[in-house]
Every structure is written in C-alpha cells, then in structure tokens.
C-alpha cells in the first residue's frame, strides 16, 4: 500500500513540502487562486477555502 495523495484539513503531512488545494472541477476548469502552504513533516493541514477541497503535494 502506498501513501495517500489527498489530505483533509487536520490531517498530518507525511513529508516536508509544498501542498496545494485541489477539488471540485479542477480537472476541467482549474481552481482560481488555490491556496498553497509549505509544511514540515508531521504538521497539520490548515482549513481549505471550502469543504469540497483537499490538499495534495505539488510536483
């Protein structure tokens, strides 16, 4: 089993890195001005802009 790729607010970051909001229709239209955060390993994810979004690591 691999690592999760999407995280909810309050989850802990598995690795240090920059994470970005994804969700809703981001595959079709993209998200305007998505939040980006840099987290250390074990830090908790902050709230997203709305309840339909999650966090994923930027490539």
Image (cartoon, rainbow, N blue to C red):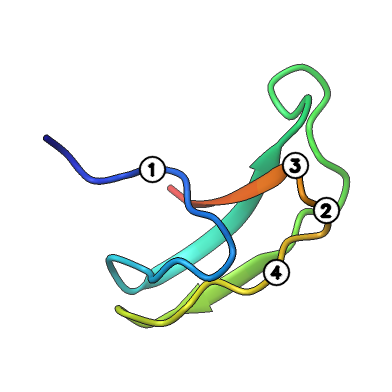
Looking at the picture, tell me which residue is in the foreground, 12 or 18. 12
Which of disc 4 and disc 3 is earlier in sequence? 4
Q: Nearer the viewer, mark 1 or mark 3?
A: 3
Q: Position of residue 34 (x, y in %)?
A: 77, 54
Q: CA distance from mark 1 to mark 4?
A: 17 Å
Label 2, label 4: how far apart the Cα atoms are: 8 Å
Residue sitting at 43 percent across and 47 percent down?
59
As drawn, the label of residue 50 is 2
Which residue has dot 4 on it? 47
Q: State the SS at label 4.
A: loop
- In-image side of 57 versus 27 (left or right): left
Q: Residue 12, how many percent across, how many down?
A: 39, 71
28, above or below 42, in the image: above
Q: Is residue 49 above or below residue 31?
A: below
Q: Residue furthest left?
A: 1
Mark 3 lies on a secondary structure that is loop
Read off the residue under disc 1. 5
Badge 1 marks a residue whose secondary structure is loop
Provide residue 39's location: percent of width, then percent of height.
45, 78
Of callouts 1 and 4, the N-terminal one: 1
Does residue 51 appear left or right of residue 59 in this picture?
Answer: right
Q: Which residue is mark 3?
A: 52
Of callouts 1 and 3, which one flags the residue occurring earlier in the amino acid sequence? 1
- Residue located at (81% from left, 40% from top): 31
Q: Are marks 2 and 3 in contact (CB under 8 Å)?
A: yes
Tell me the SS state at disc 2: loop
> Alpha-carbon distance for marks 2 and 1?
19 Å
């Amino acid at each position: 089993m691999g690592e999760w790729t999407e995280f909810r607010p309050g989850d802990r970051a598995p690795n240090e890195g920059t994470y970005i909001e994804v969700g809703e229709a981001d595959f079709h239209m993209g998200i305007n001005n998505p939040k980006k955060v840099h987290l250390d390993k074990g830090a908790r994810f902050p709230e997203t802009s709305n309840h339909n979004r999650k966090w994923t690591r930027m490539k």
